[in-house]
Image: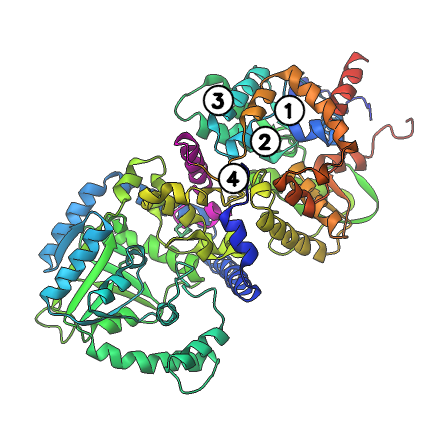
C-alpha cells in the first residue's frame, strides 16, 4: 500500500510557531555558513574534500589509531575504557561515578550522551545531572528532546523560553529579552557548578598522536564545569579519533564555519589529561570512554562514509525536508539528512521502524554540497532504500515498481501505454479512489497527456 | 524549423527523449532535435527506448531498476554521445547507475555513463558554443531553476551563460536559488505535504523577482512547479532552456521561411 510517510504527517501537524522557528533558524544558519566560508576560502570545496579524505583514511585504520590514542591517553594519566554498546557505556560511566562517590555533576553538550540517553539513566540511579549548555538546559527543564545537533532548541522561540523560566522558578517574572534569559540561566547554573563532583563532556576530536582531546563550545560551560570538579569523564564515539594534532587545523577551520558561521567557536579547549602537579586546578581524575554502539557495524556496511561526520548540523540547516518537518519528526537522536542515514544504522534493531527516514528526501543533494567532510549523503540514502527493499522491510512509501519495470523493458507495451495515456485526458482521474493520486492532484494540476506525439513527429521527419 | 545546419559537424548523437517528454512534453524533445540539427548534429532516436530507470531506483527497488537500466544501455549501445534534455536522467545514467551496479560491473552501463550528456551541457561544453544568436522581441526577465540533479555539473553555468547572451534576455537571480523545488519523483507522492510546501517556497522566491517566465532543464521540476502555480492561481509561462534556444534563434536565412 502506498501511504503517506510519518515524517510528512508530522510536518502537517507541527504548529506554525515551531515550524517558523525551525525554518528561520535553519535558513539563517545556511546563509551565515556560506558567507563566512566563502569569504575566507576561495575554494572551500577542496578543503571539504581534504577533510573527508583525512577522515576516510582514519576510518580505514581506525583500530590502529584508537590503539595509539589509548596509549597516549594512558601515558598522560587518563583512564581509557571501551564500551561496546549503549548499555555498556551507561554502566561504565555509572561505575566510574560510584567509584568516586559522585552524587552530583554537570554535563556539557554531547550527542554521544544523547544517543545513549545518559541523563535520564543517571537520574534514575540517584545522580543529580545538570545540563550546562544553555540550549540543553532548556530542553531539560521542558522535558523535551533536542531537535538539532548544534542548536538543540532551534524549534523554540524566546517567548516559550521565558515562560519556561517563569514556570520553573528560574526567574520570578516573565522576561523574553535574550540577554536577560542568558543572565538568569547563568546565575542559576553558577551555583550548581560549584557543587558538582564531576563533569561529563563529549569530545569533538581526539588526536591519536598525543591523546589530546579537543572540545569546542560557545559558552565555555564545559571548561567551567571542569574547574571545580575532581572527576572528568569524556564520552567519545570511536570515530572521533583523528591521526595527528596538525590535522586539527583543517577540521577546526571547517567546523565553526559550517555549524554556526563562525570562523572559530568562542572556546576551543585542548585537554591534555588530568591535572598535573603544577596546575592550580582541574580534575585530578580523567576517564575517557570510547563508545562503539553500532559504529563498527556501520564501518562494515556500504554506508561507512557517514562515520566521517563531525556533527556540524550544516546538512540539517540546508535540508528542505528538515526545514519543514523539524528534527523531532525523525524520532531519534539524530534528525535531518545525517540522521536519516545514521539513525537507522546505529540503532540497528530499530531499522525496520526507522526505514522510512532514508525516504524523507527529494535527493536534492544540498546536504552533500555543504558537508564539511563531503559525505555523499544522497548516495547513502539510496543504499539504505535498497537495503530496506532487500530485507523486505515494509514502508508506507513502497511504491510498487514491478509493473513499471515490466512496462519499461518492453518497448512495444511502452509505446502502447504512451499512446493510451492520452485517454487520461478525458478521464475524471481527480476523483479516482487512489489516496496518493488525490493528494498529488489536490495541490497540482497535471499537464495534458501528449503520449506518443513526439515519436510520431520524429517518424514523419525521418521519412522525409 | 527544418533549417539546414549552420555548421556541418559530421557528428551523430542518440537522443534519449525521456519518459516525461514521451508522455507530456513532446515539444521539448522536438526542440532538442531542432536545435541540435541546426548546429549540424544529426540526431537518431532509438525507437525501443523507454525510461532511464530512475523511478524504481529512487524508490529503492534496485532489482526492478537494474532491469530497466540494462534495457536502456542496450538501446543506446554504441560509441556516439547520448543526449538527454534532462539533468536528472543524465545524472541517472552518469551516477545513479554507478551505485546500482556497484556489485555487478557492467561494461555497457559504464559506456552509457561516459557518453551521456545533458543537452545544454553538450552544446556549451562539447560543441563549445558560448553565445547564442537569439533574440526576444521584448525585454524578457528569466527566472532560471538549476535543478538539483545538475548540482555540481556544468549545466547551470552553461544555461546561465547561453540565456544571458540572448538579446533582450535577462537571467535574474532570486533568493535561496540552491533550494530544491520539492518534486523528487515518488517523493512528491509519498511526502505530499512537504513536497507542496517546498514547491510553494520555491515559487515564492522565483516569482518575487517578477519574471516573465520560468526556465529549467528538467521538465519534472517544471511540471511540479507549474501544477502548483496553476492551482494557486499564479500560473506563469514555463519553458525548458532548449525551447528558449530554439524559439529565440535568429536564423541566418530568416528572410526566406
Ligand atoms: S553529515 Fe556532514 S553536514 Fe551533516 S552534521 Fe555531519 S558533518 Fe555536518
Q: Nearer the viewer, mark 4 or mark 1?
A: 4
Which is the main secondary structure of the residues drawn in magenta? helix
Asked if residue A376 lies in the magenta stretch, the reply is yes
What residue appears at the point 27 percent right and 48 percent down from the top-left corner? A239
Q: Which mark is residue A257?
A: none
Tell if the residue under mark 2 belongs to the same chain as the one under mark 3. yes
> Which residues fall within the magenta stretch?
A366-393
Same chain? Circles 2 and 1: yes
Q: Viewed as shown, does residue B230 lie left or right of A176?
A: right
Mark 1 belongs to chain: B
Looking at this view, is A211 or A364 the one in front? A364
Q: Tell me the residue that label 3 is attached to.
A: B110
For image coordinates 31% across by 43% down, the residue present is: A349
Q: Residue at x 75, y 35 (%)?
A: B243
Task: Note whether residue B48 is visible.
Answer: no
Residue at the spot of label 2: B89
Q: Residue furthest bottom?
A: A172
Q: Position of residue A228 (x, y in %)?
A: 18, 76
**Horizontally, is B88 left or right of A30 in the view?**
right
Q: Chain of mark 2?
A: B
Inter-mark Cα distance, 1 to 3: 16 Å
Residue beneath disc 4: A397
Q: State the image coordinates of residue B111 (x, y, percent, origin top left).
A: 51, 20
- Badge 1 is on which residue? B16
Disc 4 to disc 2, C-alpha distance: 22 Å
Amino acid at each position: 500500500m502506498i501511504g503517506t510517510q510519518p515524517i510528512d504527517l508530522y510536518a502537517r501537524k507541527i504548529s506554525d510557531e515551531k515550524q517558523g522557528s525551525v525554518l528561520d533558524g535553519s535558513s539563517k544558519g545556511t546563509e551565515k555558513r556560506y558567507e563566512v566560508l566563502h569569504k575566507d576560502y576561495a575554494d572551500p570545496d577542496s578543503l571539504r574534500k581534504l577533510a573527508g579524505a583525512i577522515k576516510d583514511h582514519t576510518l580505514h585504520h581506525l583500530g590502529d589509531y584508537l590503539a595509539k590514542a589509548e596509549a597516549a591517553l594512558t601515558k598522560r594519566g587518563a583512564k581509557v575504557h571501551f564500551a561496546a554498546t549503549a548499555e555498556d557505556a551507561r554502566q561504565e560511566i555509572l561505575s566510574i561515578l560510584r567509584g568516586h562517590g559522585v552524587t552530583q555533576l554537570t554535563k556539557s553538550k554531547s550527542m554521544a550522551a544523547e544517543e545513549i540517553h545518559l541523563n535520564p539513566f543517571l537520574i534514575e540511579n540517584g545522580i543529580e545531572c545538570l545540563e550546562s549548555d544553555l540550549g540543553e538546559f532548556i530542553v531539560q527543564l521542558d522535558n523535551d528532546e533536542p531537535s538539532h545537533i548544534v542548536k538543540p532548541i532551534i524549534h523554540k522561540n524566546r517567548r516559550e523560553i521565558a515562560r519556561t523560566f517563569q514556570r520553573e522558578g528560574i526567574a520570578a517574572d516573565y522576561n523574553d529579552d535574550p540577554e536577560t534569559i542568558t543572565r538568569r540561566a547563568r546565575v542559576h547554573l553558577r551555583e550548581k557548578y560549584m557543587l558538582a563532583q564531576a563533569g561529563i563532556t563529549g569530545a569533538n576530536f581526539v588526536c591519536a598522536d598525543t591523546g589530546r582531546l579537543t572540545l569546542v563550545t560557545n559558552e565555555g560551560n564545559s571548561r567551567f564545569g571542569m574547574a571545580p570538579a575532581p572527576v572528568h569523564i569524556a564520552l567519545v564515539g570511536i570515530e572521533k579519533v583523528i591521526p595527528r594534532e596538525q590535522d586539527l587545523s583543517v577540521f577546526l577551520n571547517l567546523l565553526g564555519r559550517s555549524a554556526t558561521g563562525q570562523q572559530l567557536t568562542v572556546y576551543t579547549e585542548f585537554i591534555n589529561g588530568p591535572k598535573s602537579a603544577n596546575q592550580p586546578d582541574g580534575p585530578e581524575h580523567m576517564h575517557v570512554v570510547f563508545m562503539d554502539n553500532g559504529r563498527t557495524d556501520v564501518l562494515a556496511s556500504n554506508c561507512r562514509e557517514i562515520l566521517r561526520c563531525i556533527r556540524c548540523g550544516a546538512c540539517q540547516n540546508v535540508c528542505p525536508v528538515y526545514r519543514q518537518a523539524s528534527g523531532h519528526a525523525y524520532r531519534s537522536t539524530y534528525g535531518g539528512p545525517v540522521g536519516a542515514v545514521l539513525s537507522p544504522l546505529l540503532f540497528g534493531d530499530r531499522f525496520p521502524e526507522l526505514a522510512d527516514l532514508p525516504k524523507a528526501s527529494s535527493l536534492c543533494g544540498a546536504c552533500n554540497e555543504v558537508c564539511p567532510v563531503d559525505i555523499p549523503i544522497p548516495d547513502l540514502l539510496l543504499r539504505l532504500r535498497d537495503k530496506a527493499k532487500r530485507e523486505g522491510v515494509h514502508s508506507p512509501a513502497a511504491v510498487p515498481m514491478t509493473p513499471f519495470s515490466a512496462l519499461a523493458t518492453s518497448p512495444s507495451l511502452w509505446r502502447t501505454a504512451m499512446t493510451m495515456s492520452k485517454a487520461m485526458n478525458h478521464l475524471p482521474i481527480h476523483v479516482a479512489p487512489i489516496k496518493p493520486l488525490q493528494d498529488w492532484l489536490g495541490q497540482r494540476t497535471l499537464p495534458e497527456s501528449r503520449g506518443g506525439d513526439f515519436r510520431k513527429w520524429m517518424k514523419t521527419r525521418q521519412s522525409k | 524549423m527544418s533549417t539546414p545546419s549552420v555548421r556541418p559537424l559530421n557528428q551523430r548523437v542518440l537522443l534519449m527523449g525521456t519518459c516525461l517528454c514521451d508522455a507530456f512534453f513532446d515539444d521539448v524533445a522536438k526542440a532538442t532535435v531542432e536545435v541540435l540539427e541546426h548546429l549540424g548534429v544529426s540526431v537518431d532516436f532509438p525507437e525501443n527506448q523507454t525510461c532511464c530507470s530512475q523511478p524504481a531506483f529512487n524508490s529503492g527497488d534496485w532489482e526492478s531498476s537494474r532491469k530497466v537500466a540494462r534495457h536502456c544501455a542496450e538501446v543506446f549501445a554504441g560509441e556516439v554521445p547520448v543526449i538527454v534534455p534532462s539533468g536528472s536522467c543524465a545524472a541517472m545514467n552518469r551516477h545513479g547507475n554507478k551505485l546500482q551496479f556497484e556489485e555487478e560491473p557492467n561494461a555497457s552501463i559504464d559506456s552509457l555513463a561516459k557518453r551521456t550528456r545533458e543537452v545544454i551541457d553538450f552544446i556549451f561544453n562539447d560543441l563549445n558554443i558560448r553565445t547564442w544568436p537569439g533574440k526576444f522581441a521584448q525585454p524578457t526577465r528569466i527566472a532560471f531553476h538549476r535543478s538539483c540533479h545538475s548540482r555540481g555539473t556544468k549545466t547551470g553555468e552553461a544555461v546561465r551563460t547561453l540565456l544571458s547572451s540572448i538579446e533582450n534576455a535577462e537571467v535574474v537571480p532570486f533568493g535561496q536559488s540552491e533550494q530544491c523545488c520539492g518534486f523528487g519523483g515518488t517523493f512528491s507522492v509519498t511526502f505530499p505535504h512537504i513536497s507542496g510546501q517546498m514547491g510553494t517556497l520555491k515559487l515564492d522566491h522565483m516569482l518575487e523577482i517578477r519574471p516573465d517566465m520560468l526556465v529549467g532543464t528538467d521538465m519534472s521540476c517544471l511540471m511540479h512547479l507549474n501544477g502548483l502555480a496553476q492551482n494557486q492561481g499564479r500560473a506563469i509561462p514555463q519553458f525548458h532552456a532548449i525551447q528558449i534556444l530554439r524559439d529565440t534563434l535568429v536564423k541566418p536565412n530568416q528572410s526566406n521561411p
